[in-house]
Image: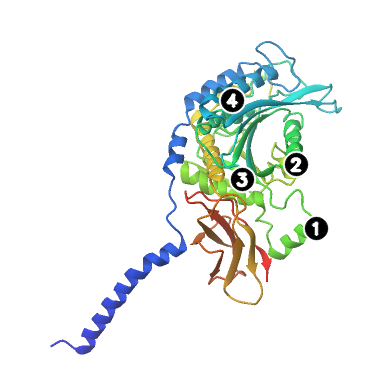
């Protein structure tokens, strides 16, 4: 004989389980849609070729020296190298359906008594992939520096192959232009091989000032400087599975109002550059296998700088990508052998598979950003009353169309966003305390591409 309690208990249990099965998919969907690799972007990444990268680099180092002050000679020096990079950029224009244009932005530099001892003409080699949306004025910029050096910063005549520093960054640009010029993107991408890095970030400073004076809507700048070496000096360590991204915490340009807001919201780890670094890690690791991207909480290496720094000084969002382990036997060295140790930035030290992966990270990030809608505007966290819940609200982006939004959340002690909640509304309330978590909001396009996250400001 069945006991009635057992019969009813089983009936209620079945009803409960059926209800749970019906409810769970909606709960999961409300939290976050499945994050996946976009097939079109994966197809672009599959085109990144070690053979192409090697071919470009062999030609680049064949110019002997690319010192910023090297004399103009046939087949030697920085001007010959600039013309080669320009020719490679221009060779891809025909397949771009008019979207790609390449030029050299020349400018004059006066002697400064330190690293420039005479008046010299410098030039940044630029390839502009124009966005297809006439209403979208966003610009994304990626760079490497074309100049090279040996031990004496003023030695403009001896061979300075600069294979890794920074031939690796320049050939990554060429390969990206080859592949990306065949695809349309709503926003504009500029690829630039800057000059004068070793003489004091001169070409980058010129371009950053130009972007500021011309009021470019420059959303993000990525500097690639030494991304092709996987062996460290002084150790037996060889590692081509990690890439560093350097980002400033407290902005180099910060008003008193910005500083007060940062202090009151404890946002010292949530600058725009830090958000870009997190984006690079998330997207890069999503699309590029066997590579971990390490967030380095510095603008650059200890007491050193790179071509992203002038952009940071102009108030732009800028980061640096750099190999995990530097080899100081090969960096800024005369070509020589001492005590059985070979010195010099020679092409035989390049790890082309590592360079391929690091190039692919750049491509994945730039394509994602240029395909996504703009970031949500006026992102705020409601402080009208004390609550253990957190309510955020925002406005739709100025550029592009968002089909939805992710609200991002992480514990205050965590470096990366831990959870993503999806909504198609312009606000969301979460049962998590803003005392214990940080939040941000990013826009999502119909194609699944995500904008940069925006850290909220207090609103009532």
- How dense is the environment of label 1, judged by Cα within 10 Å: few (below 14), some, or many (20 and up)? few
- Where is residue 454 drawn, in percent x and y? 62, 56
Gap in angstroms between the C-alphas marked 1 and 2: 21 Å
| Front label number (1 vs 4) | 4
Gap in angstroms between the C-alphas marked 3 and 1: 33 Å
Q: Earlier in the sequence, mark 3 or mark 1?
A: 3
Residue 75 visible here? yes
Q: Which corner quadrant holds the C terminus?
A: bottom right
Q: Which residue is mark 1?
A: 256
Q: Which residue is mark 2?
A: 212
Vertical side of 216 occupied by 74: above or below: above
| Front label number (3 vs 1) | 3
- Where is residue 39 drawn, in percent x and y? 41, 42
Q: Which residue is mark 4?
A: 89
Q: Earlier in the sequence, mark 1 or mark 2?
A: 2
Q: Earlier in the sequence, mark 4 or mark 3?
A: 4
Q: Nearer the viewer, residue 220 or 370?
A: 370
Q: Earlier in the sequence, mark 2 or mark 4?
A: 4
- How dense is the environment of label 2, judged by Cα within 10 Å: few (below 14), some, or many (20 and up)? some
Q: Which residue is mark 3?
A: 135
């Amino acid at each position: 004989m069945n006991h009635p309690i057992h019969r009813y208990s089983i009936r209620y249990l079945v009803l409960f389980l059926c209800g749970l099965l019906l409810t769970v998919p909606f709960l999961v969907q409300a939290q976050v849609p499945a994050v996946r690799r976009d097939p079109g972007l994966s197809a672009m990444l599959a085109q990144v070729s070690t053979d192409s990268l090697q071919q470009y680099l062999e030609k680049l180092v064949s110019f002997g020296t690319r010192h910023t002050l090297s004399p103009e000679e046939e087949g030697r020096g920085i001007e010959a190298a600039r013309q080669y990079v320009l020719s490679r950029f221009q060779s891809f224009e025909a397949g771009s359906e008019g979207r790609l244009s390449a030029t050299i932005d020349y400018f004059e530099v006066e002697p400064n008594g330190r690293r420039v001892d005479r008046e010299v003409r410098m030039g940044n080699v630029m390839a502009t992939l124009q966005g297809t949306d006439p209403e979208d004025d966003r610009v994304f910029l990626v760079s490497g520096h074309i100049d090279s050096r040996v031990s004496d910063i003023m030695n403009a005549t001896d061979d300075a192959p600069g294979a890794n520093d920074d031939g690796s960054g320049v050939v990554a640009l060429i390969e990206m232009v080859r592949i990306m010029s065949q695809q349309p993107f709503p926003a504009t991408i500029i690829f630039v091989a800057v000059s004068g890095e070793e003489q004091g970030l001169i070409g980058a400073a010129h371009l950053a000032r130009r972007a500021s004076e011309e009021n470019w809507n420059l959303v993000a700048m990525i500097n690639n400087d030494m991304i092709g070496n996987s062996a460290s000096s002084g150790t037996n360590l060889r590692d081509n599975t990690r890439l560093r991204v350097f980002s400033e915490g407290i902005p180099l340009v910060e008003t008193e109002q910005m500083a007060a807001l940062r202090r009151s919201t404890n946002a010292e780890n949530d600058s725009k550059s830090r958000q870009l670094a997190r984006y690079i890690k998330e997207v890069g690791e999503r699309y590029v296998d066997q590579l971990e991207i390490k967030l380095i909480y510095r603008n650059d290496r200890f007491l050193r700088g790179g071509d992203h720094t002038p952009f940071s000084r102009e108030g732009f969002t800028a980061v640096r990508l750099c190999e995990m382990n530097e080899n100081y036997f090969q960096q800024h060295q005369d070509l020589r052998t001492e005590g059985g140790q070979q010195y010099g930035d020679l092409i035989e030290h390049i790890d082309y598979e590592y360079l391929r992966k690091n190039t692919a990270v750049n491509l994945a990030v730039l394509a994602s950003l240029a395909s996504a809608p703009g970031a949500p505007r006026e992102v705020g966290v409601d402080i009208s009353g004390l609550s253990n819940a957190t309510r955020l609200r925002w406005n739709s982006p100025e550029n592009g169309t968002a089909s939805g939004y992710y609200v991002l959340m992480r514990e205050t002690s965590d470096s990366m966003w831990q959870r993503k909640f999806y909504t198609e509304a312009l606000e969301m309330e979460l049962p998590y305390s803003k005392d214990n978590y940080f939040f941000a909001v990013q826009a999502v396009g119909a194609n699944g591409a995500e904008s940069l996250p925006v850290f909220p400001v207090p609103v009532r």
